[in-house]
Image (cartoon, helix red, strand yellow):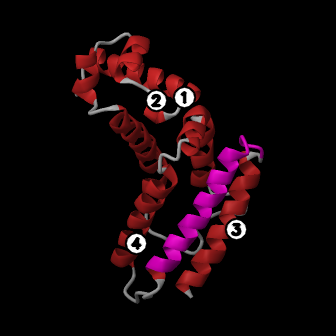
Amino acid sequence: MESPKKKQAQEAMETAFLSLLRKKPLEKISVTELCRKAGVNRSTFYAHYLDVYDLMEQVTNGFIRKLFRDIVAPLGEPTIGLVSPNGHPLIIKALQTTLENRDLCQLLVSTRSGISMKLVDEVCHWGIMRYENFSENRNTHYADNYTMMIGGIMILWYEWICSDFAAPIETLAIEITRFIEDNIKRMWL
């Protein structure tokens, strides 16, 4: 377990990093500037990260882990009746988590951190592994169809972030719910 002091230093560096990232491109952020803003020395920075690109990668991966741990993993086995007409509670939770982390999500999307593709990879890996363990009658096109479905959801998510969260969560959740149900029916039939 990480000590409170190390955790505090890491949070200070991440906060300083995100603050700098709002003002300048990643390649223009120096370790010296970041450490000064975070109130830590360079050795503390290098104890956690290789460079600012590694920091960016860890911030991105941390958000993906949070989304995956709290939202995707609890889904369990795939079923056709996965979602309710009002939007699946886990979809709503994913959108709420995104909105709660709006600044981070907008930064990650605007800096082209690869967050969308990393999320697609994580969710696709999870879904394909679940399906292979779940289904006795494997659809040979399942992996491709599932990947395309997740890609479509990620486009909706990406556009929502880029629109500064213009659509209400409930509206987007219903749209994603319908999209999922239509695609799951096609995959299972």
The crowding category of the residue bearing disc 1, from other C-alpha atoms within 10 Å (few below 14, some 14 to 19, many at least 20), is few
* 154 with respect to 48 (left or right): right
Label 1, on which residue?
24
Please state which amino acid type lies under the numbered disc 3: Arg
Q: Secondary structure at mark 2?
A: helix
Q: Magenta span has 148?
A: yes
What residue is pinned by disc 3? 178
Name the residue nearer the viewer: 96 or 63.
63
Main SS, magenta residues:
helix
Query: Can residue 86 be seen by looking at this rendering?
Result: no
Q: Amino acid at mark 2?
A: Lys
Question: Would residue 179 be found to the left or right of residue 14 on screen?
Answer: right
Q: Nearer the viewer, residue 109 or 182?
A: 109
Q: Are marks 2 and 3 in contact (CB under 8 Å)?
A: no
Q: CA distance from mark 4 to mark 1?
A: 39 Å
Q: Mark 4 highlights which residue?
A: 128
Q: Secondary structure at mark 1?
A: loop
Residue occupying the point 63% across, 38% down: 99
Label 4, secondary structure: give it. Answer: helix
42 and 154: which one is in front?
A: 42
**Can you identify the residue that label 2 sits on?**
28
Q: Residues within 10 Å of mark 2 (few under 14, many from 20)?
A: few
Task: Nearest to the eye among marks 2 and 3: give it.
Answer: 2
Is disc 3 in contact with disc 4, using a CB cutoff of under 8 Å? no
Q: Which residues are magenta?
A: 143-166
Tell me the kind of residue under disc 4: Ile
Using the rendered image of the protein, determine whether residue 121 is visible from the camera's viewpoint: yes
